[in-house]
Amino acid sequence: MIPSTSSSVSPKKHAMVVVGAGQMARAMVAGWQRQACPFSVIYTVDPHQVQDLGGGTMSCAHPSELPPLPQPFVVMFAVKPQILGSLLPQWAEIAKTAQAVFSIAAGFSCARLQQGLGRPVIRLMPNTPAAVGSGIVGYYIPPEVDSGAQALIQTLFSSLGMLVPVTSEDDLNRITAFSGSGPAFVYAFLEALEQAALSLGFSPDQAPVMAQTLVQGSLSLKAANPQSPAALREAVTSKGGTTEAGLSILMHPHSGLFPLLKATVQAAYQRAGEIQ
């Protein structure tokens, strides 16, 4: 019998077992550690990372090395989708007694997860800004999971940032393409701004700081202003001026930023579907 998640309303903290200690898992652990951690203890299991990840964590190389797990506990798979299938059988026994099982592996379907573990799995798609509490966490709850899952997710993951429920795994692929991959797209834009500053003659010391300050300042202004991005853009753009000249390139209908970003997220979305 699959354990019910309905006891998530209990004030008792869960233990968390994270399978894999890569970049995304580390970002989530860092996000949980920023404030009052929602877990009594976080175990990370990864043969390549056996050092603890800071306060409240314990690490080991293999599930057989885990101590007796306190109840309630949850399990989260945070490994590459290419290797997840081979790992599932060795976790099936532990998963049976978990309050809930989660996976953040992009594109690895609920059907394959359930086949490997013998129980339904909730899929999540976080992003790395979760490390500072400013992430986006998309999630899909398969129909086989009981109604307590919504409250459990809120309890365990809301401290990482914005929670976005979706109603299908294809929608989760869209979350993966947009916000899961999105930080890399933003950093690429920041890199491009640095290169643009260098091309104008600013020094290698000045360009990165100027680019980051430009982006942070613009976003801070937007956060303090109810106007749309389009309205704020227009407020900076004088007819016949320098901004208009630059925007004629950036906003070209065929080669500019808008079609480029659409093509970027579509390529990521297509790949997420192929992994399944």
Image (cartoon, rainbow, N blue to C red):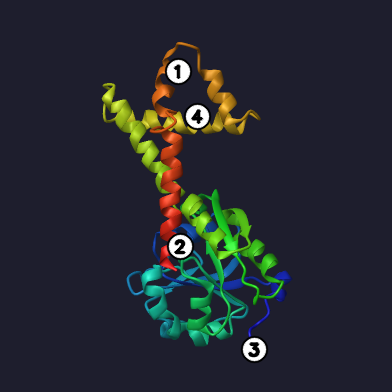
Disc 3 residue crowd, few under 14, some 14–19, many 20+, Cα 10 Å: few
Task: Give the residue type that dot 2 points to.
Answer: Gly
* In front of the other: 274 or 204: 274
Residue at point 50%, 29% (across, down): 217
- The residue at which mark 1 appears reads as 244
Using residue 194 as the reference point, say whether residue 154 is left or right of it. right
Disc 4 residue crowd, few under 14, some 14–19, many 20+, Cα 10 Å: few
Look at the image and tell me whether residue 184 can be seen: yes
Q: CA distance from mark 3 to mark 2?
A: 31 Å
Task: Give the number of the disc on residue 217.
Answer: 4
Task: Give the residue type that dot 1 points to.
Answer: Glu
Look at the image and tell me whether residue 37 can be seen: no
For marks 3 and 1 on the same chain, the one whose residue lies earlier in the sequence: 3
Q: CA distance from mark 2 to mark 1?
A: 39 Å
Mark 4: secondary structure? helix
Which quarter of the image is occupied by the N terminus?
Answer: bottom right
Residue 144 in which image quadrant: bottom right
- The residue at which mark 3 appears reads as 1
Residue at point 39%, 38% (across, down): 189
Task: Give the number of the disc on residue 273.
Answer: 2
Mark 1: secondary structure? helix
Q: Nearer the viewer, mark 2 or mark 1?
A: 2
Q: CA distance from mark 4 to mark 2?
A: 36 Å
**Count of labels shown?**
4
Q: Position of residue 178 (x, y in %)?
A: 49, 50
Q: CA distance from mark 1 to mark 4?
A: 20 Å
Q: Nearer the viewer, mark 3 or mark 1?
A: 1
For marks 4 and 2 on the same chain, the one whose residue lies earlier in the sequence: 4
Residue at point 54%, 61% (across, down): 170
